[in-house]
Structure formats: structure tokens, C-alpha cells
Amino acid sequence: MHRNSKEELRKHLVGFVDTRTTDYADSTMRVDSWRYTDPAYLAREHDKVFKTHPMVVAHSSQLPDPGCFLTVDLAGTPLLLVRQDDGEVRALVNICRHRGAQVETRPSGRRKMFNCPYHKWCYNRDGGIRNIPFDDGFVGMDRREYALAEYPADEYAGLVWVLPTAGAELDMTAHVGPEMDLDVQASGVSEAKVFRTRSFRLDMNWKVVMDGLTDAYHLQFVHPETVGPFFHTNIYKVDSYGKNWRMAVARRGIEKFRDENIDLDEFAKYAITNFTIYPGVVIATEPGHFEAWTVRPDPTDLTRCLVTLMFLVPTLPTSEKAVRFFEKNWDLLLRTVEQEDWVVARTISDGLAHTEPPDMILGRNEKATQLLHAQLARDVDGTD
């Protein structure tokens, strides 16, 4: 975090610990349970939110050199991510402009050009047509009009972001905003390397997962023997920046930083900070690593979701001891979410699907979760 942010968070978080309070929202919030299960609502949410906001699709290091590519899915659209000769990443729609076949079928690799397997239409790295077999059958066709379609892409915080809106502009620094960008850049996540990554397909709506990621109220109850003992439950500070927000949760031991004349870098290890880029990306800073979470609906079943977790480290380990250290933290993280968070989340999802509770209530001490649902209401319904 930026120095000014550290000083501000020290004052607030230590004060909350001493007064046994937290960063409260103005009031409680009602959330209708059908927002998790109603097919018509989920379809509007998918179209109005996930097709209009940028999402993480890769880590920059997965495309190290010109010609390196990845094939990914974004909100149901197959994409071909390609590192260009000028160093930029382009997000090409992985659908041949001739008859609609998938151009590249391998998950990753490096190519000078891409050949559609159906009729061998050939495309350059930038998506432009390179060659058409028996092209006398296409006399009069303007090849420029039949380049691979493209979505705007940008690299930010060491991650590749794509906006699934052709012809739009994407500037992630502007999207995040100058205040939060200062903290993201100061965190060091942009230089971090991928240590482990895993994707999950979960039988629950995406909001159930995000509700957990934005909640500092459950720590001692759901995680009594794993990560719960490390934190002050229900002690956090949330700052919103447009549609995005920063949440810092207090680790036990933060109370020793009451004195203003402290080592702010050491203090930052006790203010665990999550940057949420609406709607479904969370960048978490931990004392020894970073986590990049991407949560989005499954495009074929909106009651399910797709979650990708990247475990990032400042420097890739070169010794067995360092590898064991990161492996231990990776295993603890997986155990925490798979055996604790998502076990509870599954009961929530099942309960919402098979009963008819009229609504749920978010307390004043669930401010970040309130921010998520308030913004969704504005985007999907046009209301608060």
C-alpha cells in the first residue's frame, strides 16, 4: 500500500480494536433471495454486468514472448489471447470469419500464424487474414472486413484483463481509479510471479462465493483452527472508489502499532488488504504472497460459477525450503476455501434453491458485501 494509506489504516484499525467496533455501513440491507436463483434475473445480471465489465483472463507471465497464445473462455465467448510483436496482448475472438469454426484448439503455445482446421484460412498474430486457399472463390471480398473479431484488452497488476464489448476502450488504470491504483502499484503485485493456479466449477451462484470473499464477520466461526486465529474477527476498514473498493482486515498483533512512530512496512503485514474490482475480481495481499481471485457465472448454467485462483509470489522459490514454505501456504489456502468456506456456501446455495425465504439481511458490519449488492442493484435494476 501507499504510505498515506498505511498511516490512515493504522489509525482506524488500531482504534477499532481498542473500541471493539468496526467500519459500519449506514444501515442494514435487505437482499432478496431470488437474486441468487431466478433465471430471468441471472440472465439480466450476466448481460448487464459481466458483459460490460472487464475480467481477468490470464497472468501476463503466461504470455512471455511474441507469438505466445492462450485460448480462454470469457462470458461464453472463446478468446485467443496473443502476445504481439510490439509487446501488447490482443484478445481475438477464436471463431473463424469464414464458417465459424474454432481457429485455435490448443490451450496454449506459440505460433507465427493461426490456421483454421476447417478450410485452412490463415490469420496473422494480429487477427488479420494472411492467406485463403483457393481465394479465387472470394473475389471482391475485402479481407480487412473479415479479420478475427477483437475485444479490448489491457495488462494491469500483472494480469491480463478483457472487456467483452467489441469496439470499446479499456484502460485499467483509469478503471481502477487513481486512489486505489496508488495502493495496488505500491503493493508489488504487478511484479509477482505465478507459483500455483487452479480453476474450480462450483455448484452455486457466483454471488455466494463473492459474499464470502467480501466478509470479515465469519472468520473465527468458519475457520476456528485454520486462518481464524490469525485475525481479529469483524475488525476491518472499507474504502470505496467508484464501483471498486479496498478492504483491510486486522491481523492479531496489530494493536502493537498504536505508536505513530512505527515501521509502516512492518505494520502492513498486519493489515491484510483485498482490492475488489467489481464485479468479481479480488486481489488479496498477504505477508508473503498475493492471491488473484476471479469469480464469474458459468455461461451455460448461471446458477453455477467458475472460480480461478492464482497464488502469486514476489520471487519464484529456488530452494527446497522456500518451495515447502509456499506449498504449505497454498495447501492451507485450498483447505480453508474447499473444506470450510465452500462447505458453508454450498448449504447457502442449496437452501436458497430449495426453500422460499423472502430475503436475507446484511448487517451494518458487512459493509463490503453491501457495496457489492448495492452496485448490482444499480446495474441490473437501475435502483439502489
Image (tube, grey):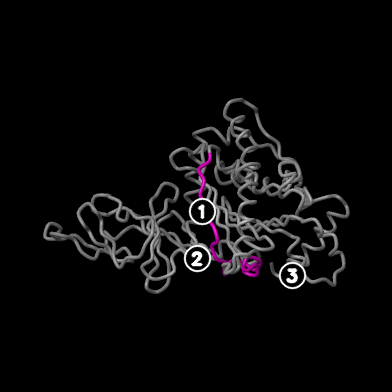
| Rendering coords of residue 249 (x, y %) | 74, 55
Q: Is residue 127 left or right of residue 32?
A: left
- Callouts 3 and 1 close, C-beta under 8 Å: no
Crowdedness of circle 3 by 10 Å Cα count: few (<14), some, many (20+)? few
- Residue with the mark numbered 2: 155
Residue at the image position 51 percent from the left and 65 percent from the top: 171
Q: Nearer the viewer, mark 3 or mark 1?
A: 3
Residue type highlighted by circle 3: Asp
- Callouts 1 and 2 close, C-beta under 8 Å: no
Specify the quadrant of the image occupied by residue 384: top right
The magenta segment: 181-202
Residue type highlighted by circle 2: Glu
Which element carries disc 2, helix, strand or loop?
strand
Query: Quick check: 53 above or below 188?
Result: above
Outermost residue on the bottom side: it is: 86
The numbered disc on residue 265 is 3
Which element carries disc 3, helix, strand or loop?
helix
Q: Nearer the viewer, residue 243 or 248?
A: 248
Crowdedness of circle 1 by 10 Å Cα count: few (<14), some, many (20+)? some
- Residue with the mark numbered 1: 53
Residue type highlighted by circle 1: His
Which element carries disc 1, helix, strand or loop?
loop
- Mark 1 or mark 3, which is nearer the start of the sequence? 1
Label 3 vs label 2: CA separation?
A: 27 Å
